[in-house]
Image (cartoon, helix red, strand yellow):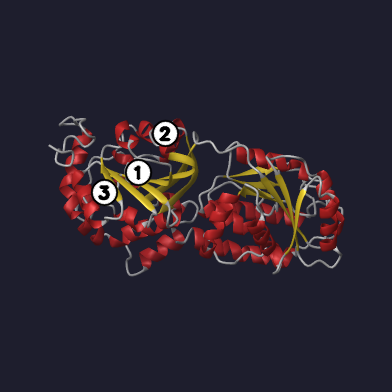
Amino acid sequence: MSKAENLNAPSGGEMLAPNSRKAQILEHANRIAAERGQWIERNKAYYEDDRRFMRFLVPKGSRILDLGCGTGELLASLEPSHGVGVDLSPNMIALARKDHPGLTFHVGDIETPGVLSGIEGPFDYIVLSDTIGMLDDIENALGLLHRLCGPSTRVIIAYYSRLWEPILTLVEKLGLRMPQPPLNYLVNNDFLNIIDLADFEPIKVEHRQLVPRRLFGIGTFINRFIAPMPGIRRLCLRNYFVVRSLKAKPRTDLSVSVIIPCRNERGNIETAIKRMPAFGRTQEIVYIEGNSSDGTYEECLRVKDAYAGKHDIKVLRQDGKGKGDAVRKACANASGDILMILDADLTMPPEALPKFYNAITTGKAEMINGSRLVYPMEDEAMRPLNFIANRFFARVFSYLVNQRFTDTLCGTKALTKKHYDAIARDRVYFGDFDPFGDFDLIFGAAKQNLKIIEVPIHYAARTYGETNISRFRDGLTLLRMVVFAFIKLKAL
């Protein structure tokens, strides 16, 4: 009897005990397979919202492994460049192969090591949607995934909130929901503990669907604009965890490009080179000048020639306006494995840049943001109103991107060229909205599910020139971006 025919041997020869919970799940899945499409159509609003959010988390064209893939409709909706699905049920897989011939599907129990050992990784994304509740040992099952993970792999785990267990049980008895096998409903804190034990690290946690029905548009409105709000979101039906493997180590011998946007900063150009520490396999300095009136461009050219034997220096001139435009052009022309942004006012000491480099090469994070608000700063380095605004925006943006920020307005940031290119490719999602360049990277990193941490720095007072920031005009711009980010990151 073949593996597809033998319902008691989904893992290739390893029999399931007739009365085991896994055997019940297998029997149920085989029985419900032919009806699954009808149930999805009956609960169309719920499934469309779930698929839409999954497509937000997983960029089109990714390499995707879907564990517990059912009939393959979720995997197909993500439009992978290479898609592999695994499910316990031969009947589910038979339908998946018939409906989605361009994808690869395997029958097997993902808790059995031999099932995943035949699959070649790494993948960009590994998806477990409504699969965790069917596993006997979640920690061990997650542990089997490390072999399929690279440093940039993200594991996305979606499951029902335990708060909804009585409601879901009721609607299932009323015939309004697809019948379910015996499930484990997890409390989020318990699941976070299991993730830690399995050597994974959470990147973000999202909650979706307060009303899993359209209700003439009322449910849609609530799910988009009310359900994501702090406090309320914990009442939602769906929990989404994005995690990464702590065993997948990045390269450590990386080159670096230090990008220095400069406008009317002539007095700081040579100082930046003199104070620049040596770090990285190779180091490139990229001055990007913004049509100054004090001879900054000419000074950049002079410094490039004067230090040609000691430093690899590029001098670019931006075509548009604003720091954001300058940073984008410089990043596109930089050659380093790691990109760092250092403001030419040197209020962030160049001597601290090796900390940013080390945080990336040791795998502690994939995007680094400087924080000026941890250590005491020099007198007049930041005005009181600016300090208050920074604290306010830090709290708001921590909520928007699901990672902790204390200083979103610090201009010093670092990320790999690979991750920057991914942000740039997906920039159409946000559009050209950010004149500063800081939030283009922050929102883009959040969209790409990058691990972000802050490196505390000692913030110094400016010694040359004047700030190019207008507190009130740019403050209003930031408020508009908060609304913009809520719509793009939360109200999906």
Q: In this view, does 172 lie to the left or right of 409?
A: left
Mark 3–mark 2 Cα distance, whole angstroms, equals 24 Å
Quadrant of the snapshot with the N terminus: top left
> Can see residue 150?
yes
Position of 161 with respect to 492 (left or right) is left
Q: Compute the Cα span from label 3 to label 1.
A: 22 Å
> On screen, 459 above or below 245?
below
Residue on which disc 1 sits: 162
Q: In this rendering, does residue 160 appear at all? A: no
Asked if residue 353 is positioned above or below residue 19 in the image, the reply reads below
Which mark is nearer the camera, 3 or 2? 3
Amino acid bearing label 3: Gly
Name the one closer to the observer, 101 or 420: 101
Q: Which residue is denoted by mark 3 in the rendering? A: 70
The amino acid at mark 1 is Arg
Give the foreground label among 3 and 1.
Answer: 3
